[in-house]
Amino acid sequence: MRYILSAILISALLVLAGCSSKENQDETELLVAAASSLTDTLSELKRAFEAEHPDIALTLNYGASGKLSQQILQGAPVDVFLSADQQWMDYLAAENKIVTDSRVDFAQNRLVLIANQNVSYSVNTLSELPSLPVEQMAIGDPDTVPAGNYAKQALSNSDVWGDLENAYVYTNNVQQVLTYIESGNTEIGIVYASDLKRSGLVNKLLTIDHKLHEPIRYPAAVTASSRSQKAAETFTQFLQTDQAQAIFQDHGFSG
């Protein structure tokens, strides 16, 4: 009798294991490559999306939009790309690396000039920056980091880009700018308005005039190499829902 019960138990466990395996196979896993400025926001969006779509699991990879686009071009197994600017999405589109019809703009942002809490400056316009006793200013590398490119545009259109040439500290992404300012390694820097929601260790000195740079619009697209394009499009469409847009606004973005 004992052996019969053992056999029944083993059989039951095998059946359960088979069901579990089937359930895992039915779940679609998507790799999402996203601009680093979306870090906290996307983590919350992931929870909301997976609660609504339990058959789809998201894996998030953050970085500078330029570097992420290069990785996709080189064959990284990415399903969805979320860029902080249009340039790098255009770059992939020109190389036929995205599904064109899946491309959507899902959020907007603003640039802000920030300082460490221990630093107190009064700034009304970017044109005043050369008169400040500032030795270092952190911005994203304009060649790969959209926030850095927008910052360069704003500073150039304010006629101070060249005047501050010796002060720039270039970072690999906008998150590093925030970290440098928080730690006091640099005195001031330019980040997104949404970054202020992620830190209580910096002060906003100025919201930069949006007319000084190109509009900051975040595009999303499904990659041409994705093996789960239908599920990937489900996620990009979710980014446009009222639920997702409310999360973006809570984190300092605009719709």
Image (spheres, grey):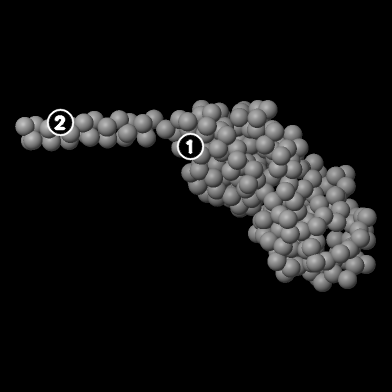
Residue furthest to the front: 1
Question: As shown in the figure, which amino acid type bears the numbered disc 2?
Answer: Ile
- The answer to whether residue 81 is above or below residue 159 is above
Task: Let me know if residue 204 appears in the view.
Answer: yes
Question: As shown in the figure, which amino acid type bears the numbered disc 1?
Answer: Ala
What residue sits 7% from the left and 35% below the top? Answer: 3
Q: Which residue is mark 2?
A: 8
| Residue 238 in picture, x, y percent from top left | 61, 29
Q: Nearer the viewer, residue 47 or 63?
A: 47
SS assignment at label 1: strand
Task: Let me know if residue 94 appears in the view.
Answer: no
What residue sits 55% from the left and 48% below the top? Answer: 61
Q: Which residue is mark 1?
A: 57
**Image quarter for residue 151?**
bottom right
**Image quarter for residue 136?**
bottom right
Q: Nearer the viewer, residue 185 or 63?
A: 185
Q: Is residue 172 left or right of residue 167?
A: left
What residue sits 13% from the left and 36% below the top? Answer: 6
| Residue 33 in picture, x, y percent from top left | 57, 45
